[in-house]
Image: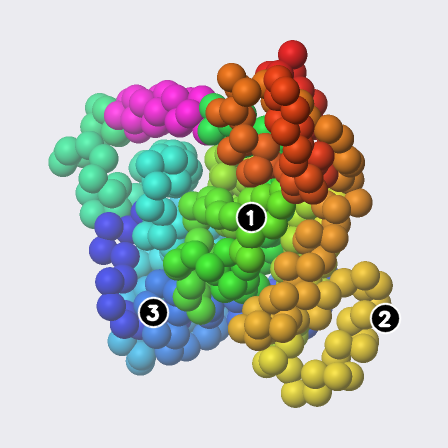
Amino acid sequence: MHEHAPQGPERAVLAAVQLTEVDDGEQAASLAELRRLAKTLGLEVVGEVRQRRDRFDPGAYLGSGKLEELKLTVEGSGAGLVLVDHEISPSQARNLEKATGAAVLDRTAVILEIFHRHAHSRAAKAQVEIVRLEYLAPRLREQGQARDRQRGGIGGKGAGESQLELDRRKIRDRIAELTAELAALAKEGEVQRARRKGILRVALVGYTNAGKSTLMRALTGSEVYVADKLFATLDTTVRVLQPDTRPRILVSDTVGFIKNLPHGLVASFKSTLDEALEAGLLLHLVDASDPGFERQLEVTVEVLQEIGAGDLPRLVVFNKIDRVADEAKTAEELHLRWPGSLVVSAKREPDVARVHAAIFGFFAHDLVEADLRVPWDRQELRREIFDGCQVLDERAEEEAAVFKVRAHPEVIARISRRLA
């Protein structure tokens, strides 16, 4: 990764090869997304060079004619960065840098840089660093003299095969150290999730910038970070659904998905998506105002299947309807194509109330009624009963308090085992 990655409004030029099997709409959507990724990094996009080819040029990604055009565009705009709309090989990146005189970040490197900046928890930081190091390792040889400024603080100065091997060993050692740290953190997470066993949970999932954090804040009243940027949320947040319900329902936010997300990131962020795997309901948010929302919806479904959450119950929520020109017409079309979906704006209280009602209504179908007899010397269980159940009635008997409750069968079974 480039240690001098932009801290301010540095200028960048986009470079893209449109393969012949890719249609114009898909290519335009991909480049628009790359522009938004650049904006998230605080970059100013000042130019764009596109080429249609049967395949990428093995030497420098672009053909010689377009490579010259890219060089002139970089020189004429004063850009210090070239952002490539694909993952390219280390040698292609090196040749592009030599030809243009600018630093080169491929799509994977851009996403990794964003993840690096937005990771806050120990787990998220460790996961991002592992993938960044795995990305960096095969590029050490190609980086040559530029290696020192790109290695992100790994290793010392020097050149030659011995220094290369030293750098690689340090990377391997650091990855092993981070992997052990993640394993310890994963055990802590398992303990926390075990404590919540039987509690009703809904997980917000969806394409990045679909409005998950905005809806999370509206549903839970929590101060979740919200920004109109890609990957504003990387750390899983768990809050209680508000207004409070009985039984209580936990809501978790998750990292957003994106097309061509680096494979290592999908794998390494699986732990942050464990909340989705253990949820009883997935709230799949879609930005209805985005022209490419259908492709984004498909990408989210694909990633859910990849992490093993494809069969979980899912409620599709089309968000940001307030940004659409003809709300009524759009809502009607969306309901026709996706029956049972919700069309809302997370910024409108009545819409948020509809989502709240849909969540509670989903879980209410699975609730059963039961009597729980709690001996007077076991009244410490009262809090657990009131947190996990809807208490319909409470009466006193000579040896115990009897609670008539409505709750999930698993919650009732757990409390009953403690009373046995």
Secondary structure of the residue carrying numbered label 2: helix
Which residue is at a point 67% across and 48% down the rendered structure image? Answer: 282
Above or below for 353 versus 142: below
Give the spatial CA distance, label 2 vs label 1: 28 Å
What residue sits right under mark 1 in the picture?
251
Disc nearest the viewer among 3 and 2 = 2
For the question of whether residue 305 can be seen, the reply is no
User: Counting residues from the N terminus, which is met first, the one under dot 2 or under dot 1?
Assistant: 1
**Front one among 339 and 105:** 339
Secondary structure of the residue carrying numbered label 1: strand
* Residue 82 position in % (x across, y down): 37, 64
* Residue 42 position in % (x across, y down): 33, 68
Disc sitting over residue 43 in the figure: 3
Q: Is residue 4 found inside the magenta-colored segment of the image?
A: no
* Residue 125 position in % (x across, y down): 34, 40
Give the spatial CA distance, label 3 vs label 2: 40 Å
Secondary structure of the residue carrying numbered label 3: loop
User: Counting residues from the N terminus, which is met first, the one under dot 3 or under dot 1?
Assistant: 3
* Residue 328 position in % (x across, y down): 75, 84
Residue 75: quarter of image: bottom left
Q: Amino acid at mark 3?
A: Leu
What residue sits right under mark 2 in the picture?
336
Q: Amino acid at mark 1?
A: Val
User: Counting residues from the N terminus, which is met first, the one under dot 3 or under dot 2?
Assistant: 3
Magenta stretch, residue numbers: 168-189
Residue at the far left: name it: 157
Type of secondary structure dominating the magenta stretch: helix
Which residue is at a point 69% across and 42% down the rendered structure image? Answer: 392
Above or below for 55 versus 200: below
